[in-house]
Image (cartoon, rainbow, N blue to C red):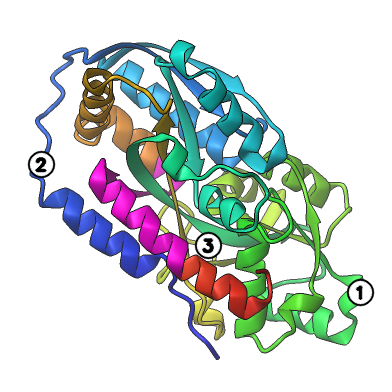
Amino acid sequence: MAQFTLTRRALAAAAVAALSLGSPALAGGHQVVDSIHFLIPGGAGGGWDGTARGTGEALTKSGLVGTASYENMSGGGGGKAIGYLIENSASSHGTLMVNSTPIVIRSLTGVFPQSFRDLTLVAGTIGDYAALVVPANSEIQDLNGLIAAFNADPGSVAVGGGSVPGGMDHLVAAMVFEAAGADPIALKYVPYDAGGESMAGLLSGEVQAISTGFSEAVELAKAGEVRIIGVTADERVPAYPDAPTMVEQGNNTTFVNWRGFFAAPDLPEEQLVAYQDAIAKMYDTPEWEEVRSRNGWVNIHNSGEEFRAFLENQEKVIGDLMRKLGFL
């Protein structure tokens, strides 16, 4: 079986690069930025939404940022928000847009014409593992049960996700299925607008399983509404140790989805430095640790040119994999 670690090595290298810049000073309640408006390219309840609101919570409660506001702007697989930020650059200097691996994938597939190169790169901040999830009352008990049901009748198994066909949630599911020896191209994938809607589709019975961010599934799993049948971590995640890894079930798929922040293309240098300073100082605050541990995120901090180098590497690695799986 093939092993997919398409972001782990790059993320580790990026983390080392960030650490080499020196540890940020303790925040000490010093306000760095007056206010931030967070632009979220998907709907409520998804990974982007949780990342933006969790980051805003930590920044404001720690005193690093005075106030934070939030705006969900769905559409075009994230392209609507990216286009808005570019077209309204002059009036958007107070805005940070959250994004993640899909900004690379959707640019490669032509879902939208822009790429990360058209924006100001602020910082990569966290990693979130991926997970396959079924309803708590599903007959499917584990990952191998899902694969067995698919192999018996591929048309009877639909997997949903909060991204477009060929997007990240689809790509993760395809990686898992290929690693299990199943045909990833035959997988019936149902796209939803962000993780919250895909979870609703799962609970209503529209799909048999969903591919989603681990942090998006944890609270519902704890509440007994869903069952996480596999997480793409090397080891079980302390935030929810009941969730088995893909690896322990004989499926050698590991994956971490980075998330980070971008700004308008002509953002003044002093404002960029202030944003980067606030985010760097955030990591040493108890408010951030509370948010991070609650969501099961991994700290991955890279900013500026380190962030650019990481994205360019991921673009190559993901592009090669997508061609192998027939998505490009």
Foreground pick, 151 / 73: 73
Horizontal and vertical percent for residue 140?
77, 71
Residue on which disc 2 sits: 23
Q: Which mark is first along the chain, 1 or 2?
A: 2
Residue 28 image position (x, y, % from top left): 13, 19
Give the mark nearest the N terminus, 3 or 2. Answer: 2
Q: Quadrant of the C terminus?
A: bottom right
Q: CA distance from mark 2 to mark 1?
A: 52 Å
Q: Residue at x 30, y 55 (%)?
A: 309
Q: Amino acid at mark 3?
A: Asp
Label 2 Cα crowd, 10 Å radius (few <14 / some 14-19 / many 20+): few
Mark 3, residue position: 242
Q: Quadrant of residue 46?
A: top right
Residue bounds of the magenta highlight: 293-316
Q: Is 153 on the left or on the right of 52, as rendered? A: right
Q: Are marks 2 and 1 in contact (CB under 8 Å)?
A: no
The N terminus - image quarter = bottom right
Give whichever of discs 1 and 3 has the lower sequence position. Answer: 1
